[in-house]
Structure formats: structure tokens, C-alpha cells
Amino acid sequence: MAHALPWGAKQAVLDGIVESLDHFEKFQQIGHGLGVESISVRGANGLVWGSINDRWLIGTYATKREWAPDIVELFKHFFLTANDGGTFLDIGANVGLTLFPVAQNPRVQCYGFEPEPRNFAYLNLGLRENCPYDNVVLSQVALFDRKDTVKFELSSSNYGDHRVRVSETDGLLGEGSREVILVQAERLDDIVHVDRLKRPLAVKIDTQGAEPNIFAGGERTLTAAELISLEFSPHSMRRIGGDVEAELQFLAAHFREGAIAVGDQEGVPQWRPISAIVEELRHYSADPGIGTKYFDVTVRK
């Protein structure tokens, strides 16, 4: 019916589709019909490549044209106040939505770690488009508490929700039925020479529950960080089985204050003493009714 309409009316129908809430899903359907596998989206975080199947991460970026603006601004401001730049570690870099904006400061040496092959390929495409200063090094590894080859389970609709698999049981998100690949895992302290890093050091850790394992394998490096942004997901951490209490004790011992926000809710950090942050996270970790709820945590010295 739309095909038979005159050009102006046909354009109005298309405009209505684009303005609807589920327009990315409609775009996906059209793309699938045309054999499209990958897309690039230009927004505030740069020109970013991703899978057309990624309804959550790429779909959100395509819809909003920005990603985690408050966290990105926090890191950018942190390095602007350092006259000589510094070092940024993006652990779980995905397709570069945090890495690329930070790397626009040529005085900041950036390292991105992403184990999943398709995301890593997209990350490299974005690197060539967004980072002209030769200040970014990418590594296709999963940071963990040991050097190993580990199972890695893949989400079919959220390419930011891939994760290390330790438990073979089905999780609350149906993780047991996910496609599984093998990836190389390394300890952060084994592949980063912290004494050679330009200071100050800031770190982002978003690894879908492997955060306690990363702290265990990167204690020396992370002790040197002035600012860390990390995800805290009790369900995901339980499935992987890292030592959450050890992570909390590390935060309490090495940082002065922090902020907590419910996952993906934007807002300027509301800083509180680190003791209050750790106790709140400890409560969430022990709560049997927490479900799949997760939190974005920022800590600083």
C-alpha cells in the first residue's frame, strides 16, 4: 500500500516509522532483508561500527547518538586537569564507545582490551576512523585472574553482554543456551608494566561479572589508579565465581570516596566516603532477591 502512494505521502510514512519508539527494530528488519550484517553510527562518541543484531548497545547509540555521557565526561575532565595527560585502561572496550572520546586527547596513552573477535574487529575499524594520534594500543584478550584459555558466552542481541563462562548452569538471563567460544585470558599485571605507565592512571572495567577476577590478577596495576569506573553485577559475579569480598576490601583500602548509580542511569557522581560505598555494595552482593540488577560504581583517591 505504501509503495503505491505518491512520493510525498510515502515520505510521510517513512518519517513516521523513523520517529516511532521501535524504529531501530524496524531498521533491523529491513537490514536483515537486505543481507546487512554490520553498520556504522556517527554520534557524540565518534563513528562506531557494530553488528546490526546488537539491539541494545548499537541500537541505543543509533537512537540517542551518545553513550554514557557522564562517565565519558568524567574521564575526559580527569585528564584535562593533568597537564601532561596520563594513561587510560579500557577493560572490556567493546566497540570503543568510551575509548574513542578519551583518546581524542593526544596526551593520553590509551589501552583497550576486548576478547570477542567480532567486537575486536569493529573496535579496529573505529580506531582508524576516530583516533589519529597513534595513542591507542588494542589487545584481543580477556583480563582475568590467570593466564588461560577460557570459555566465553555470547549474547545474540547485546554485544556488550558477552562474558566469561565458568558455570554451565542456566542463569537468570538464559545464559546456559548462549553460543560459546574460546578466548585467551591474561592477568593484567602480567601484560601491563605499571612502572612504565604515564601518570595519572584511570581505568574503566566493564566485564559482565569478571571484575573480582580482574582485581585479583591486576592488584599492582589497579593500586596505582587514581580513578576507576566499574560495573557491579551480583548475578554475573556469582556465575563466574570471583572473590567479591576481596574486591570490596581492595576498594576500601586504596580509595577515598566513591559513587553508585543503578546500571545505565546517567547522572553526575554523588561522592560519598568509600566506607559507605563498600557497605552498600556488600549489601547488594548478599541480597538473594537482587536478581539481574546491576550498578555502575566510580571510585577515586
Image: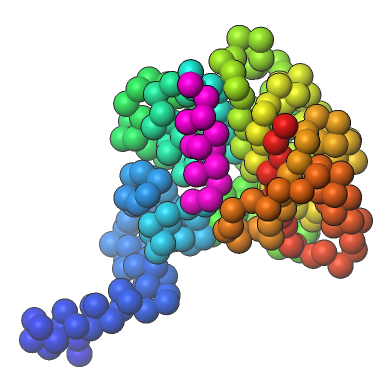
Residue in the image at 86% along x and 67% along y = 289
62 horizontally vs 169: left or right = left
Q: Observer-nearest residue: 102 or 62?
A: 102
Q: Can residue 137 be seen in this view?
A: no
Q: The N terminus lies in which quarter of the figure?
A: bottom left
Q: Is residue 8 visible?
A: yes
Q: The C terminus lies in which quarter of the figure?
A: top right
Assign the magenta stretch its main secondary structure: helix
Counting from the top left corner in percent of width and height, residue 266 is at: 57, 58
Instruction: Magenta stretch: give its range.
Output: 69-83
Residue in the image at 65% along x and 33% along y = 227
15 horizontally vs 288: left or right = left
Counting from the top left corner in percent of width and height, residue 284 is at: 85, 57
Counting from the top left corner in percent of width and height, residue 167 is at: 81, 47
Q: Observer-nearest residue: 6 or 214?
A: 214
Q: How many marks?
A: 0
Counting from the top left corner in percent of width and height, residue 106 is at: 39, 23
Q: Observer-nearest residue: 177 or 225?
A: 225
191 horizontally vs 280: left or right = left
